[in-house]
Image: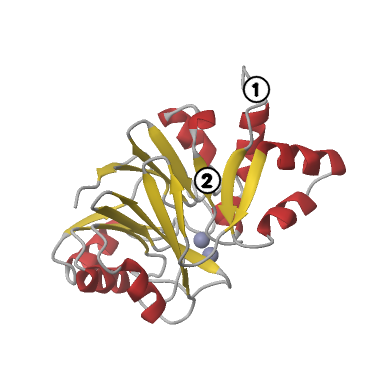
Amino acid sequence: MRLTVLGSGASYPGAGHACAGHVVEHDGAAILLDCGNGVLANLAKLMDPTRLAAVFVTHAHIDHFADVYALQAALRWAPEGPCPPLDIHLPPGLFERLGAMLTARGTVELAEAFRPHDIVAGRQVSVGPFAIVAAEVDHLSPTFALRVSVGQSVLVYTSDTAAGPAVTAAVRGADVIIADATLPPGYEGRAPHLSPALSATLAEEAGAHTLVLSHLWPTVDREAAAREAGERFAGRVIVADELDTIDIDS
Ligand SMILES: [Zn+2]
Ligand SMILES: [Zn+2]
């Protein structure tokens, strides 16, 4: 299983960055975890976006779904298109709210591009070689962390979340964790997010071998984030950057 970071930014993208998005590939299959602003342009550097097998949107914050509209256009206007509907998994009600932004015609086109599925915590979804299980975490209600497994290899994407028992349970046993690392020093507790230090504690307790710090504000000092995490986590720390690839083995 190979992870590629498409967007490491939080809330709004800094120069050359994009908001939340990660593609996971194995055996020729690819799934997209979040589709924030700027993600589609980076996905196109890696692969034909119409090759995706499924998309997961973890919650209804714009930095996690803005490029669903761009993906819809890529599916519709592909050279051999329109493509068959692409499976999109998202919190209940969000697909209808995405359509409500559009004209009547745009709503129809969105519905033609995607086959929506409600994310249900604890229910396994199989997509090609991937088994995906969502767990609700502590952020905008609802927000889902995603556990992606191929054989014994496990990747957990925390999405956005405060520290606490929900995300601690969600990451247990992960080999690689993509963690919300939004909060700079001094901000802990002021917003429902993790900091690099909190992410590192989580990864240490989970027994992961690699921690990918992601969802970073453009103003964050990335070297300091790596240092803070390294003081609390004995494994490998990676500060996510666009198009970084990480191979995931158990
Ligand atoms: Zn976010
Ligand atoms: Zn959020």
Could you tell me how many numbered marks the image carries? 2
What type is the residue that disc 2 sits on? Answer: Val
What type is the residue that disc 1 sits on? Answer: Gly
> Do we see residue 164 in this rendering?
no
What kind of element bears circle 1?
loop
Which residue carries the number 1 mark?
A: 81
Horizontal placement of 163 versus 114: left or right? Answer: left
Above or below 103: residue 209: below
Residue depicted at x 73% and y 42%: 111
Which residue carries the number 2 mark?
A: 55
Residue 245, percent from left and from top: 29, 40
Horizontal placement of 188 versus 97: left or right? Answer: left
What kind of element bears circle 2?
strand
Which residue is nearer to you in this view: 1 or 17? 1
Name the quarter where the N terminus is drawn: top left
Horizontal placement of 14 versus 214: left or right? Answer: right
